[in-house]
């Protein structure tokens, strides 16, 4: 399995140069059956990452361009009356795919953003009183522009909490950028990319993550992090039980990517920033260190004594 994972990461790295750490985080998010939020300025490769992951993994990709006039029905689908059948026929929206690229999700109004809540949490959509199951695997990759840019709506906390991870890509290093400039047509190369695994193999990888052992001492450490985040003098609101499960699943995925059969504290610390940063807001009386970096405070929490 490790050789297969290395091949997948290398395949994605062909199109997103110099970002292996971010690619590994995205893969950990996928293997943990979570959803990914990529926040950064336009033009640094957010959409490229989503398309490259879908093609390398052999998954069906549907792109939804979020705009201020987008409606929930444009995402979920709509029922149209069929005169021949004398009944309403449901026309599924683009949400019915294995990988959803929600491009510039914060350019849509909160009502439209909330259309993804049930799909991301439960893998299903309820329309007209009927529940329809989404394809598996189901993975949402949302891109978000910085909030200071014109025409953006902040994602509500309930929506942010549905994303297991949030990552930033940033500018490439000089060597990677030089290689990117040499590429004649990166889009053409991406369209010609072939799948390296089958969807069934991906589900085997996800099942392998669940077999990664988690010791009681590791659970004590995660609970210590959750408890520390709930200090009212430090954060406005602490990490929820859902965030705790996300931290556990993400740690198992990272250990799996590293080729280990059990989770170490280093695995928790590796994924902690991407899993907790978008869930935490400094409190009114937060220390200066928390105001500068809300996650660094948690990284300093010592391991519980046995």
Image (tube, rainbow, N blue to C red):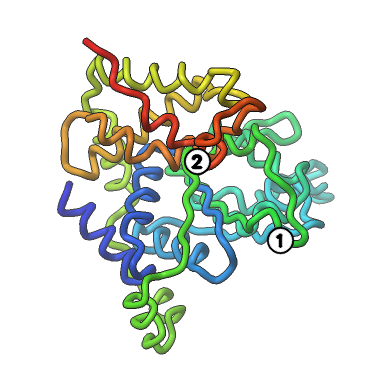
Residue under the image location 50 percent in, 59 percent down: 61
25 lies above or below 233: below
Q: Nearer the viewer, residue 273 or 185?
A: 273
Residue under the image location 39 percent in, 78 percent down: 177
Label 1 SS: loop
Q: Is residue 158 left or right of residue 255?
A: right
Residue farthest top in this picture: 306
| Mark 2 nearby-residue class (10 Å; few <14, some 14–19, many ≥20) | few
- For the image, the number of numbered tags is 2
Residue under the image location 53 percent in, 48 percent down: 37
Quadrant of the rendered structure where residue 146 is? bottom right
Q: Is residue 194 left or right of residue 167?
A: left
212 lies above or below 258: above
Q: Nearer the viewer, residue 176 or 286?
A: 286
Mark pair 2, 1: CA separation: 22 Å
Q: Nearer the viewer, residue 19 or 79?
A: 19
Residue under the image location 43 percent in, 36 percent down: 296
Give how far across and how far down residue 288 sits, in percent: 55, 35
Q: Is residue 228 left or right of residue 14?
A: right
Give how far across and how far down residue 295 sits, in percent: 46, 36
Label 2 SS: loop
Q: Which residue is mark 2?
A: 293
Point out the frontmost of discs 2 and 1: 2
Q: Which residue is mark 1?
A: 149
Quadrant of the rendered structure where residue 176 is? bottom left
Q: Quadrant of the C terminus?
A: top left
Nearer the N terminus, badge 2 or badge 1?
1
């Amino acid at each position: 399995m490790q050789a297969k994972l290395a091949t997948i990461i290398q395949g994605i790295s062909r199109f997103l140069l110099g970002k292996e750490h971010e690619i590994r985080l995205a893969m950990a998010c996928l293997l943990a059956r979570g959803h990914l939020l990529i926040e950064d300025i336009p033009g640094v490769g957010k959409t490229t990452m989503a398309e490259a992951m879908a093609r390398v993994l052999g998954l069906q990709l549907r792109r939804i361009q979020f705009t201020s006039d987008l409606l929930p029905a444009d995402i979920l689908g709509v029922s149209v009356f069929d005169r021949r059948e004398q009944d309403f026929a449901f026309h599924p929206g683009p949400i019915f795919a294995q990988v959803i690229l929600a491009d510039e999700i914060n350019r849509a109004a909160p009502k439209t953003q909330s259309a993804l809540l049930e799909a991301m949490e439960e893998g299903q959509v309820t329309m007209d009183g009927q529940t329809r199951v989404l394809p598996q695997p189901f993975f949402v990759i949302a891109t978000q522009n910085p909030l200071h840019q014109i025409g953006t709506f902040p994602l509500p906390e309930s929506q942010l909490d549905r994303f297991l991870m949030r990552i930033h890509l940033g500018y490439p290093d000089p060597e990677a950028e030089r290689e990117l400039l040499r590429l004649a047509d990166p889009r053409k190369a991406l369209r010609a990319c072939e799948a390296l695994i089958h969807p069934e193999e991906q589900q085997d990888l996800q099942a392998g993550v669940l077999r990664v052992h988690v010791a009681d001492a590791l659970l004590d450490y995660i609970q210590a992090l959750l408890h520390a985040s709930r200090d009212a003098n430090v954060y406005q609101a602490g990490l929820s039980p859902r965030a705790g499960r996300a931290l556990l699943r993400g740690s198992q995925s990272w250990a799996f990517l590293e080729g280990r059969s059990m989770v170490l504290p280093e695995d928790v610390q590796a994924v902690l920033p991407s899993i907790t940063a978008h869930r935490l807001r400094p409190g009114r009386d937060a220390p200066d260190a928390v105001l500068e970096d809300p996650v660094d405070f948690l990284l300093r929490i010592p391991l519980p004594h046995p």
